[in-house]
Image (tube, rainbow, N blue to C red):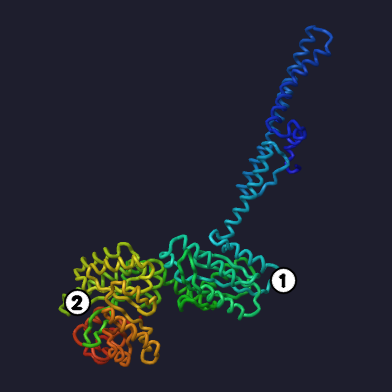
């Protein structure tokens, strides 16, 4: 009560049993007394007066007037004081909205306004707790969010006895989660994330901290590091636990995860953000090298990040500045030695950095969506170039163009391809589009519909990087493709690694049984060529025949038969080599 002295009259009236239960009764009592004071004063004056003289009359009227004014003033003051609970409650609400200061309103009163103060106090405390929870915890998993995660770490390490303590932060990212979301219903995606959170909670110890930073990323902090091996064991345990299948509403879902790890001492609040940024760098690095692994942060990763940011910024507008180029690499018939197709490959000639490797800029373009306009531009340039070769009198060949995941997801993809064929006046039979298994598996039914619509245009379809994805015969026979392309990872050690040879043999046999053409990528030696030719592979592609070259440099290969190492044996080797040296072509 001392906090609100203006409530003294309200508290005084609350002592009377007749007034305690009703705020209206308190108001009426004050109003009654205030309006009857003048009458009582007048009555008392007559009682004490002994005469009815004029002087006495004037005296009585004066007393009545004074009593009326005094009673009215007292009534107004008392009513104002009785309104204090309402005013105090309103002020408390306003203070909370302005400063988030929680009020200490009295809760011992039981009438209407007392209930108002009690409920307001309880509501504001509950609201404050709810706001704190919303701002500190992830609504989906119930785990702490980034803010609370960093705040708790800072509180632990700000204690004097922990000032020199080392901590390990593990950033756990679900691989290819964005693609997975497209194939799953929204509710199933949420259930999957909740299940991931539960499994992570099982992996950590009581002293560890766990948080959900964003949709596909979790963080684990190991506060008590007994050895670096304990961090490695925790990482391996998390990877193996998450690799086990999830059963979500009757569907079996397989996922993998990658982990970026940083170990450091932290002495300030801003250090937490820096620590997470370093863990992000480690996670990015491990995803560049391969999935389902862990990687410790190394200082040189900052330089790689700066390079990525430079590429990302410079890539915007590269098309408009005419910095993009199309190189071509031939596909060779292994029986006749004839060039049967050319694969169109995007290249970027940076004005100051020179020719930037596609391995550096293609993933960035894929991530930020620039791959869509770049891919469409490459498709148009490739179709126009193929038509130019035909008009120049060269034998018609296929032009092969890769479709990225984002391009394939476009709802108007078929219309875009049809329009480009019409604009370039290229017969659809001479266009081949390449897609990967992983792209097709995101949404099976939609992929099949899109492929069938492309086939209806007359376009040939190739399944790229075959053997590195899902590789299910049940799925493969449903895809209306014309060709399988054996991934270069199998071809590069085909003559020395029995496993690679076995996979290659199986792919060739599978293609033949399905009456599909087969192309081997990455052919670099005569031994690889001989092996593939003996097994019945139809086409070969790789540095043994030619590196990717600009159209004017690669055009001479269309003149005749390619035998052996074309870059050394053919009549046009000198021209091709000169072009390669001039452009300093990077290996794709």
Residue 584 appears anywhere in the view: no
- What secondary structure is marked by label 2? helix
- What secondary structure is marked by label 1? helix
Disc ID at residue 161: 1
Most foreground residue, 567 or 23: 23
* For residue 14, above or below residue 64: below
- Measured as percent of width and height from the top left, residue 71 is found at 73, 23
Residue drawn at (71%, 34%), measured in percent from left and top?
21
Most foreground residue, 43 or 144: 144
- Measured as percent of width and height from the top left, residue 292 is found at 49, 76
* For residue 356, above or below residue 64: below
505 relative position to 48: left or right: left
138 relative position to 585: left or right: right
- Classed neighbour count for the residue bearing mark 2: other residues with Cα under 10 Å, few (<14), some (14–19), many (≥20): some
Cα separation between marks 1 and 2: 76 Å
Residues at marks 1 and 2 touching, judged by CB atoms closer than 8 Å: no
What is the quadrant of the N terminus in the image? top right
Residue 359 appears anywhere in the view: yes
Residue drawn at (31%, 72%), measured in percent from left and top?
479
* For residue 513, above or below residue 219: below
Sequence-wise, the earlier of marks 1 and 2 is 1
Residue drawn at (60%, 66%), measured in percent from left and top?
270
Disc ID at residue 389: 2
- Measured as percent of width and height from the top left, residue 560 is found at 19, 86
Q: Which quadrant of the structure image shows residue 38?
A: top right
């Amino acid at each position: 009560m001392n906090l609100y002295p203006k409530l003294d009259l309200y508290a005084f009236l609350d002592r009377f049993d007749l007034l305690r239960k009703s705020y209206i009764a308190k108001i009426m009592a004050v109003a009654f007394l205030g309006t009857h004071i003048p009458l009582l004063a007048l009555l008392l004056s007559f009682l004490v007066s002994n005469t009815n003289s004029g002087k006495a009359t004037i005296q009585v009227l004066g007393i009545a007037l004074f009593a009326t004014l005094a009673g009215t003033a007292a009534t107004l003051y008392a009513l104002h004081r009785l309104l204090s609970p309402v005013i105090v409650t309103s002020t408390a609400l306003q203070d909370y909205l302005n400063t988030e200061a929680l009020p200490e309103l009295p809760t011992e009163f039981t009438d209407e306004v007392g209930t108002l103060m009690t409920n307001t106090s309880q509501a504001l405390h509950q609201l404050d707790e709810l706001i704190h929870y919303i701002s500190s915890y992830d609504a989906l998993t119930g785990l702490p969010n980034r803010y609370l995660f960093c705040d708790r770490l800072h509180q632990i390490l700000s204690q004097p006895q922990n000032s020199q303590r080392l901590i390990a932060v593990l950033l756990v990212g679900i691989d290819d989660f964005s693609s997975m979301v497209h194939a799953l219903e929204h509710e199933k995606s949420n259930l999957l994330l909740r299940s991931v959170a539960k499994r992570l909670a099982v992996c950590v110890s009581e002293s560890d901290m766990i948080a959900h930073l964003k949709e596909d990323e979790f963080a684990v902090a190991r506060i008590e590091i007994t050895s670096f091996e304990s961090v490695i064991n925790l990482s391996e345990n998390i990877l193996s636990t998450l690799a086990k299948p999830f059963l979500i509403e009757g569907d079996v879902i397989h996922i993998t995860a990658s982990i970026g790890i940083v170990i450091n001492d932290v002495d300030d609040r801003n250090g937490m953000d820096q620590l997470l940024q370093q863990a992000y760098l480690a996670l990015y690095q491990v995803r560049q090298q391969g999935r389902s692994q862990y990687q410790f942060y190394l200082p040189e990763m900052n330089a790689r990040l700066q390079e990525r940011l430079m590429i990302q910024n410079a890539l915007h507008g590269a098309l408009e500045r005419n910095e993009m180029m199309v190189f071509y690499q031939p596909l060779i018939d292994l029986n006749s030695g004839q060039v049967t197709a050319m694969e169109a490959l995007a290249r970027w000639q940076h004005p100051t950095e020179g020719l930037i490797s596609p391995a550096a800029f293609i993933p960035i373009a894929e991530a930020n969506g620039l791959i869509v306009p770049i891919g469409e531009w490459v498709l148009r340039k490739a179709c126009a170039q193929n038509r130019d070769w035909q008009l120049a009198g060269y034998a018609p060949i296929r032009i092969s163009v890769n479709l990225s995941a984002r391009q394939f997801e476009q709802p108007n993809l078929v219309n875009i391809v049809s329009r480009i064929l019409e604009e370039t006046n290229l017969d659809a039979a001479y266009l081949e589009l390449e897609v990967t298994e992983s792209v097709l598996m995101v949404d099976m039914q939609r992929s099949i519909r899109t492929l069938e619509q492309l086939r209806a245009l007359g376009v040939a379809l190739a399944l790229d990087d075959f053997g590195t994805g899902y590789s299910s015969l049940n799925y493969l026979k449903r895809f209306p493709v014309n060709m399988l392309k054996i991934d270069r990872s199998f071809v590069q050690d085909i003559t020395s690694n029995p496993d690679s040879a076995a996979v290659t043999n199986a792919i060739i046999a599978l293609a033949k049984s399905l009456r599909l053409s087969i192309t081997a990528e990455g052919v670099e030696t005569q031994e690889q060529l001989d092996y593939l030719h003996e097994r019945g592979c139809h086409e070969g592609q790789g540095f043994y025949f030619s590196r990717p070259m600009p159209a004017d440099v690669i055009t001479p290969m269309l003149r005749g038969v390619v035998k052996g190492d074309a870059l050394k044996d053919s009549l046009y080797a000198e021209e091709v080599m000169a072009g390669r040296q001039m452009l300093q072509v990077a290996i794709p």
